[in-house]
Amino acid sequence: MSVSAATDKKIRAAMERLLNGEPTRCDGKLTYTNLAKEASVGYSTLWKADTSLLTEFKRRAAGSDAPAPPAVTVVGKLTQQRDKQAAKITRLRAEKAELEELVRVLKHEIAALVVDNEHQQAELERLRARIRRLEGGNVRTLPQPQTETDPMNGGPDVGAPA
């Protein structure tokens, strides 16, 4: 909630008069009630004013020259929490998308490995069947290397000058 610009201006002017010791409508004590009287506004209207204005009045009335801390309202805290949660949700959604993409890639790799494994199993079974046939007595004679006199085997050529 806030007050109009004119009311805000009246409260600020009244605050300056009170703090300077020049009140016109009250006894001069630095209280919120006197601030409301000096500004010619109701006490409830004063509380609708900007919270930083009231914090400034309280700080200056206490004699502190330190700058007023920024006013943190409940709405501000809730906004900060909402923003943090929104950022966290955005980050989690991005991580979820990355994980879903990784799962998709891994599924394709697994499928490729399954097909490759099936091919290797079939090849292994074919080789085992061949070994069984060879062990069963159906062994053919393997070609033997030719003799040294064979020109194809590095031997001397028949009829060639020596």
Image: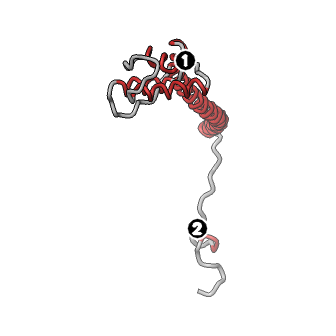
Q: Nearer the viewer, residue 113 or 20?
A: 20
Farthest-out residue, front: 24
Q: Position of residue 145 (x, y in %)?
A: 59, 62
Viewer-side residue, 43 vs 158: 43
Quadrant assignment, res 48: top right
Quadrant housing residue 143: bottom right
Q: Is residue 6 visible?
A: yes
Tell me residue 28's x, y (percent).
38, 20
- Quarter of image, res 110: top right
- Which residue occupies the extreme bottom position in the image? 161
Inspect the image, locate mark 1, and give the three-letter code of the amino acid beneath it.
Answer: Lys
Disc 2 marks a residue whose amino acid type is Thr
Percent x, y for residue 87? 56, 30
The residue at 60%/58% (across/down) is: 144
Q: Is residue 131 left or right of residue 47?
A: right
* Disc 2 to disc 1: CB gap under 8 Å: no
- Name the disc covering residue 147, or none: 2
Q: Residue at x 66, y 37 (%)?
A: 112
Picture disc at residue 48: 1
Residue at 60% x, 65% y: name it. Answer: 146
Kindly report the distance in space between the C-alpha atoms of the residues bearing marks 2 and 1.
Answer: 117 Å
Q: Residue 15, position in %: x, y?
A: 45, 26
Going 53% across and 13% down the picture, which residue do you hit? 42
Q: Residues within 10 Å of mark 1 (few under 14, many from 20)?
A: some
Closer to the camera, 87 or 92? Answer: 87
Residue 98 lies, with reference to residue 45, above or below; the image says below
Q: Judge the density around disc 2: few (<14), some (14-19), many (≥20) Cα neighbours within 10 Å.
A: few
Query: Of tags 2 and 1, which is closer to the observer?
Result: 1
The disc, 2 or 1, on the residue closer to the chain's N-terminal end is 1
